[in-house]
Structures are given as structure tokens and as C-alpha cells.
């Protein structure tokens, strides 16, 4: 994950002082990438231990790794998109970098051994991507149930057990209409996998497994609600289905 992705994942856990430090890092990224931990502490009126604590809260092993990832992020940022195709390329690169740093084994094992695998999508685009994912799993011999409608999702949530698995695909992860169903799954100890855009949200907070994808905002010629690119949702689900096929063919 690059610096911005890690920030979105851990932002809510940061203190006010740490959020101010992050603002400085974002505004002076190139300068920070070449600074020592002592220099950054002085520039942000913080101690070395505060800087190190921030780095670890964001999932880095230390300040050196933070600087390394920051330099990588700068390298991608310097390739400024001049069109929507370039922006899509960035989304895919960032999602793929996240995939390379993610351990799928526990989720794959649960997918294989679950008595029932239930899939639910929170929107039209999410549902289209999840349909393809469901079909890929069928081809690999993994039976699954794609549920449509919030009411149906709530009904089936009452019938599932700890031996099942639910995978929910979403954009924000904060869809109000499914929160009751998520609570039921939690009460019944049903394993949940969330697939959302990067960031902390309701789904990830209640999930046993979480996968993320990049979803950049697209220009809206009507100037109304924001539109997001969902290409990387299909991308992450395709990767998951391929990794599942590899898992059952080669890892058993």
C-alpha cells in the first residue's frame, strides 16, 4: 500500500497531534522523504518517539519504511494523469501494489471450507462485478449464492452459522440499509469479508477479512452526485477468484 492508502486505513485511529503531523508530511512529502526522524520531529514540534509512534500506527515497521513508501508514492504522483486513461492506470497500479502486499491464505481457506458462501453487493456496479466473481467461483467448483435486495440479505443472515462465509462488495462500506444484517451476522458469529474502496468504514470495522480497491472520482458532466470508477472492484475480485483457483489446484 502507498502512503495515502495507509493513511485512509488508519486515519481515524490517529490523535489530533498525529493528524497535524500527517498534514505536514503530505504538504512537504519530498522534503520529509529526505529528512531524518530527528529533523521531522523538529519541523513538526514533536519528539522522535512521537514520529516513530505515528509511523507504527500507520502500519510501518519504522520511520525508514515510511520514508521508503513515501518516495514510492512520490514516484507515482510525479506521473500526473493528463487524461482519464492515465488515471485508470494509476488506480490499477495502486490496487495491484496493495494485492502484492496482502496475504490471502486465511480467506482462501475459509472460502474453500465454508458450508455456504453467500455474496452480496450494495449497488448496481458492485452487483455486476460480483456476478462475474460468482460465475468464476462456480467454474472453480465453489458453489455460492448471490443475494439481491437488502430484505433478502437480512433474511438469509438469520439462517447462517459460523461455518458459513459472507462476502459483501461495496464502494464506501457505509450503506445504511445493510447494517442490521451485518449486526445479525456478528451476533451469530458468521465470518464476514468486506470488499470496499480504501478507508475505514462500517463494513471493515465488522469484518473478519477485508480487501480493498482504488476508486477514483470521475468527472460528472451533469454536475450532480459524484461518480466513481469501479474498474478496480472487478480487478480485485478477479484476482481473488484466480488466487482461489491456484489455492485449490496447487496449495492443497
Image (cartoon, rainbow, N blue to C red):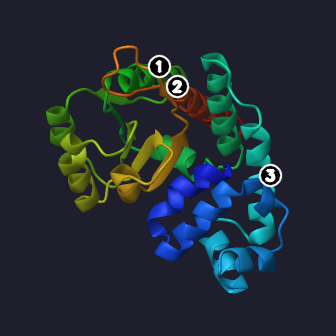
Dividing the picture into quadrants, the one containing residue 239 is: top right
Residue drawn at (55%, 48%), measured in percent from left and top? 109
Q: Nearer the viewer, mark 1 or mark 3?
A: 3
Mark 3 in CB contact with mark 2 (< 8 angstroms):
no
**Relative to the observer, which residue lies in front, 129 or 153?**
129
Residue 65 placement, left or right of 198: right
Residue 103 placement, left or right of 168: right
Disc with the residue nearer the chain's start (1 vs 2): 1
How far apart are the two marked residues, 1 and 2, measured between alpha carbons?
8 Å
Secondary structure at badge 1 equals: helix
The residue labelled by disc 1 is: 132
Percent coordinates x, y for residue 98 in the rendering: 65, 44
How far apart are the two marked residues, 3 and 2, measured between alpha carbons?
28 Å
User: Dot 2, how many residues are within 10 Å of its Cα: few (below 14), some (14-19), or many (20+)?
Assistant: some
Mark 1 in CB contact with mark 2 (< 8 angstroms):
yes
User: Dot 1, how many residues are within 10 Å of its Cα: few (below 14), some (14-19), or many (20+)?
Assistant: some
Secondary structure at badge 3 equals: helix
Percent coordinates x, y for residue 227 in the rendering: 40, 25
Secondary structure at badge 2 equals: helix
**Relative to the observer, which residue lies in front, 75 or 132?**
75
User: Would you say residue 252 is visible in this rendering?
Assistant: no
Disc with the residue nearer the chain's start (1 vs 3): 3
Percent coordinates x, y for residue 16 in the rendering: 47, 73
Percent coordinates x, y for residue 208 in the rendering: 43, 56
Residue drawn at (38%, 41%), measured in percent from left and top? 172
The residue labelled by disc 3 is: 71
The residue labelled by disc 2 is: 234
Q: Nearer the viewer, mark 1 or mark 2?
A: 2
Residue 71 placement, left or right of 138: right
Give me the disc on residue 90: none
Amino acid at each position: 500500500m502507498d502512503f495515502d492508502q495507509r493513511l485512509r486505513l488508519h486515519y481515524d485511529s490517529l490523535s489530533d497531534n498525529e493528524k497535524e503531523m500527517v498534514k505536514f508530511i503530505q504538504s512537504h512529502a519530498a522534503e520529509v522523504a529526505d529528512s531524518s526522524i530527528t529533523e521531522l520531529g523538529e519541523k513538526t514540534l514533536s519528539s522522535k518517539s512521537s514520529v516513530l509512534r505515528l509511523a507504527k500506527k500507520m502500519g510501518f515497521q519504522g520511520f525508514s519504511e515510511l520514508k521508503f513508501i513515501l518516495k514510492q508514492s512520490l514516484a507515482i504522483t510525479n506521473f500526473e494523469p493528463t487524461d482519464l486513461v492515465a488515471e485508470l492506470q494509476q488506480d490499477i497500479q495502486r490496487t495491484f501494489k496493495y494485492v502484492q502486499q496482502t496475504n490471502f491464505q486465511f480467506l482462501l481457506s475459509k472460502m474453500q471450507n465454508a458450508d455456504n458462501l453467500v455474496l452480496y453487493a450494495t449497488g448496481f456496479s458492485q452487483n455486476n462485478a460480483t456476478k462475474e466473481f460468482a460465475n468464476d467461483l462456480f467454474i472453480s467448483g465453489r458453489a455460492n449464492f448471490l443475494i439481491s435486495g437488502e430484505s433478502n440479505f437480512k433474511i438469509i443472515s438469520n439462517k447462517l452459522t459460523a461455518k458459513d462465509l459472507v462476502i459483501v462488495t461495496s464502494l464506501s462500506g457505509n450503506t445504511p440499509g445493510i447494517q442490521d444484517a451485518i449486526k445479525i451476522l456478528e451476533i451469530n458469529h458468521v465470518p464476514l469479508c468486506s470488499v470496499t474502496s480504501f478507508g475505514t468504514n462500517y463494513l471493515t470495522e465488522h469484518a473478519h477479512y477485508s480487501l480493498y480497491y482504488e476508486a477514483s472520482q470521475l468527472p460528472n458532466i451533469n454536475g450532480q452526485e459524484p461518480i466513481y470508477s469501479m474498474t478496480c472492484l472487478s480487478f480485485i475480485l478477479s484476482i481473488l477468484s484466480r488466487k482461489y483457483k491456484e489455492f485449490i489446484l496447487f496449495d492443497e
